[in-house]
Amino acid sequence: MSDLTVSTDLLRPVTPAPNANSDRMRATAESFEASFLSEMLKPMFQGLSTDGPFGGGDAEQTWRSFMIDAMAKQTVKAGGVGLADTVMAEMIKMQEQRA
């Protein structure tokens, strides 16, 4: 086995410096996470029948993508899966490298 070391900087959470861009970065990161989750949720609903007593018929099938997007946004609003935090940390690192 090889000796593998990990920098403690990788284990420390990155907190954004308070500035005018941090709110915009958070919104962008959360929007990205919602888009990602929406794409991951789509296959779960493909092939589901909209017929039967509890199905929504053609209307359900037509509006399903909007429902999936709303579910993804609500998931992010409830805390998400942590992707927004990672994206925001990378955005902060990119800004720091430019400065």
Image (cartoon, rainbow, N blue to C red):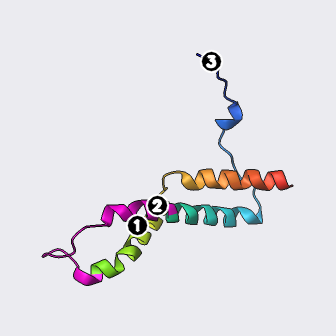
Name the image quarter holding the C terminus: bottom right
Contact between marks 1 and 2 (CB within 8 A): the answer is yes
Looking at the rendered structure, the kind of residue marked 2 is: Leu
Marks 1/2: CA–CA distance? 9 Å
Residue at the outermost bottom position: 59
- In the picture of the structure, the residue carrying the numbered disc 1 is 71
SS assignment at label 2: helix
| Residue 17 in view of the camera | no
Q: For residue 9, which quarter of the picture?
A: top right
Amino acid type assigned to the residue bearing label 3 in the image: Ser
**Disc 3 element:** loop
**Mark 3 or mark 1: which comes first in sequence?**
3
Task: Work out whether mark 1 precedes mark 2 in sequence or the reverse, and give the earlier one.
Answer: 2
Determine the residue located farthest toward the right in the rendered image.
Answer: 99
Instruction: Say which quadrant the N terminus sits in.
Output: top right
Magenta region includes residue 40: yes
* Helix, strand or loop for disc 1: helix
Q: Which residue is mark 2?
A: 37
- Residue bounds of the magenta highlight: 36-59
User: Residue at the spot x=65%, y=18% of the render?
Assistant: 3
| Residue 13 x %, y % | 65, 42
Farthest residue, direction left: 53
